[in-house]
Image: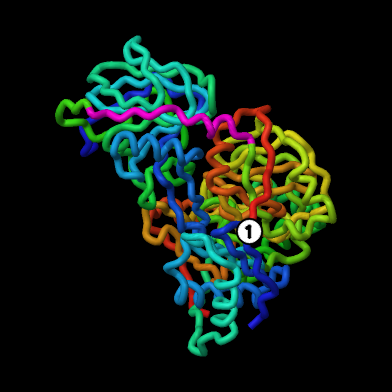
Amino acid sequence: MSQYKGIVEVIKPGFYTSVQDLGRPGLGHWGIPISGPMDEQSYLLANHLLQNDPPSACLEMTMTGGTFKFHHQAIIVLTGANGKAHINGKAISINQVVEIAAGHELEIGPFYKGTRMYLGIKGGFKTALSFESRSWYRGLTKYFRCPKGLRIPFEAVAEHSHNNHSKVGIDDSLFENNVLDVYPGPEATEMSNGNFEALFEKSFHLSDLQNRMGIQLSETFKNHLKEILTAPVYPGTVQLTPGGKIIILMKDAQVTGGYPRILQLSPESINILAQKKPKDPIRFRLKEF
Amino acid sequence: MKPLICYKQFSPQHLELQWKPEIAPDTLFAIRQAKAIVERELGSTFHEARIGYHSLSLHFKEGISFQDVVPTIDKLLHNPPKEYHESRKRWRIPVWYNGKDLQQVAATHELSSKELIQLHSAPNYLLHFYGFMPGFMYLGGLAKTLHTPRKAKPDPKIEKGSVAIGGKQTGIYPLESPGGWHIIGKTPINLFDPAASPPLKPEPGDEINFFPIDQEEFDQLSLDAKSAIHYESI
């Protein structure tokens, strides 16, 4: 029995939907990834608009939104990617805090801008904790992607809310920006003369090989680096395979890897990348520290 | 102790300490000692310290200055406390050697299944670190005769508890997963329990020894929910 009264029923889960909070930093020594929202900025905005604590769990939807039936009244907000969204047929906009009545359905279509949308809820979703986090991860939590029919608990709102719901304008910089700020990775110095510099001279494109663990780029980048002895990696670590494929590790990245680590993304650039689609162009820009 | 060879900062918050690139017990013990020292002296300033075969990587909470932090760490590591001592354990893990790739791996190396099992269960493997997935051990010490290139096409589903060989390494899949290693057996012991605290018992620096069991013993241990992993002090 759940101690939380509110229930959202998943009518359609969308393409890839999971529960995310701020994840599990500090458990790499057990092989446990950090996880958490792919676009942390939009996730934090959802909780900010709802006046939630930052670690309040949201639903992260990828490419396509889902349809959710609220069995109890709730206060919600959508942030991040933009797509058509309706509550019982009435359109709502992104970054708008709205009340949804018991029995009503929230229906979200495919996204026309961005790749990851967050559904925040007042009080946060209350799925089970694993290592003090509700972020879904295979082997640690019961689900790793949202199945149809799942009933997700949340803390039901006791009273009607007031009219001080905040709404902010849409900040498009996350979606318009194609430049990823990076630092030289641990193996950058082993790249041959000019090879490292070549990373900053052209655009790359996202391939369709991508998930919460990592995103592979389409281009083949010639190099002479061999595999390395398994070493630590983090979200934002850019790996170069012996075949010349570039893989950018994301939030569910494993904690160690055997490919040379040529670059490290800034945390802000991970958010930008999380909103890109397959075939979208990106460029790397070298930053100093 | 084996000397550190370099420091590499790869973001305002990430610093890696590197030793000579090799898989060696001495290197692991030097890394473990360095980890213990920086955790004790500077632990509140970083989220975590992760280890690899020849590296220790620190993820700081705030941006650091290389010029400030590196001399501090260098000084700490050059005067290690004399009392440093790790108590180590040797964990004994039962394996029913009936994996679907056992015959094929044996044939590749012109061994009988029995010889393969003897070679695999003889060493005391050194647990270097956990990586790849929660609770997956990186073990050093696989006999050269058993080094086997990974599969060209990974298996979509490898059962939890599978004992496998991949390249120069051997290990146990603590959770069901896809994987490219050759499956030679299976342990009935649950090595990773996310509900337990800690979720796993062997620590980096400990040793792992596999011992062969038959189907009957496997079934018995599988049925006994409490069947635990045993160890001796070393």
In this rendering, is residue B71 above or below B115? Answer: below
Quadrant position of the N terminus of chain A in the picture: top left
Judge from the rendering whether residue A144 lies leftward or rightward of residue A194; answer left or right. left
Q: Amino acid at mark 1?
A: Phe
Most extreme residue toward the left is A159
Judge from the rendering whether residue B223 lies leftward or rightward of residue A219; answer left or right. left
Q: Main secondary structure of the magenta part?
A: loop
Kindly indicate the quadrant of the structure image that contains residue B106: bottom right
* Foreground residue among B138 and B3: B3
Q: How is the image coloured?
A: rainbow
Most extreme residue toward the top is A89
| Whole-percent x, y for residue A274 in the image | 55, 36
Q: Which subunit holds the residue at mark 1?
A: B
Most extreme residue toward the bottom is B82
Graded by Cα atoms within 10 Å as few (under 14), some (14 to 19) or many (20 or more), the crowding at tag 1 reads: many
Q: Which residue in the structure is indicated by mark 1?
A: B10
> Residue B187 lies in magenta, yes or no?
no
> Residue A177 lies in magenta, yes or no?
yes
In this rendering, is residue B192 above or below B75? Answer: above
Q: Which residues are magenta?
A: A164-178
Kindly indicate the quadrant of the structure image that contains residue B206: bottom right
Kindly indicate the quadrant of the structure image that contains residue B178: top right
Q: Residue at x 64, y 39 (%)?
A: A179
| Whole-percent x, y for residue A87 in the image | 33, 15
Residue A132 visible at all: yes
* Foreground residue among B26 and A69: A69
| Whole-percent x, y for residue B207 in the image | 57, 71
Q: Residue at x 23, y 19 (%)?
A: A101
Mark 1, secondary structure of its residue = strand
Q: Residue at x 74, y 47 (%)?
A: A241
* Foreground residue among B86 and B119: B86
Q: How many marks?
A: 1
